[in-house]
Image: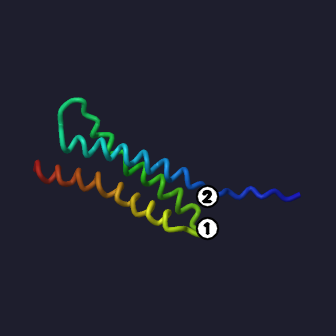
Amino acid sequence: MIHNNSKKFNLWIPLLLLLLNVILTSFLIEELLDATEPNYGFLGFLTPIVALISLVYIRKFKGEAHGFLVRILQALNWLFIILPIAVFMVFLLAFL
């Protein structure tokens, strides 16, 4: 008896990570617009980590046929990686 233990691509995992990234990015944007208390903007700098997890998960299943939604998810993951780094660099250059 042969058991097929191959793992299947679950689309809900990258979508859940996308939702988490949107929430964390909204904290960062809110902090950029209004710096009053409470300050949760530092949580926006966790988005590159979550986006990298999503990128690795999607690339792990590269052999499967990727649809348009998965390509959009990959583009959004790159955005979530670049945006906090760009914000950090702008503030770093502004205060030097």
Residue 19 as seen in the image, left or right of residue 61: left
Looking at the rendered structure, the kind of residue marked 1 is Glu
Total labels: the figure holds 2
**Nearest the eye: 13 or 95:** 13
Q: Quadrant of residue 2?
A: bottom right
Residue visible at 41% across and 49% down? 49
Viewport quadrant of the N terminus: bottom right
Where residue 74 appears, as percent x and y from the top left, is 44, 62
Residue visible at 53% across and 68% down? 67
Residue 33 as seen in the image, left or right of residue 68: left
Q: Secondary structure at mark 1?
A: loop
Residue 59 as seen in the image, left or right of residue 43: right
Determine which residue is flagged by label 2: 9
Looking at the rendered structure, the kind of residue marked 2 is Phe
Where residue 66 appears, as percent x and y from the top left, is 55, 68
As drawn, the label of residue 38 is none
Determine which residue is flagged by label 1: 64
Q: Is residue 89 above or below residue 45?
A: below
Residue visible at 61% across and 67% down? 64
Q: Are marks 1 and 2 in contact (CB under 8 Å)?
A: yes
Q: Is residue 59 above or below residue 42?
A: below
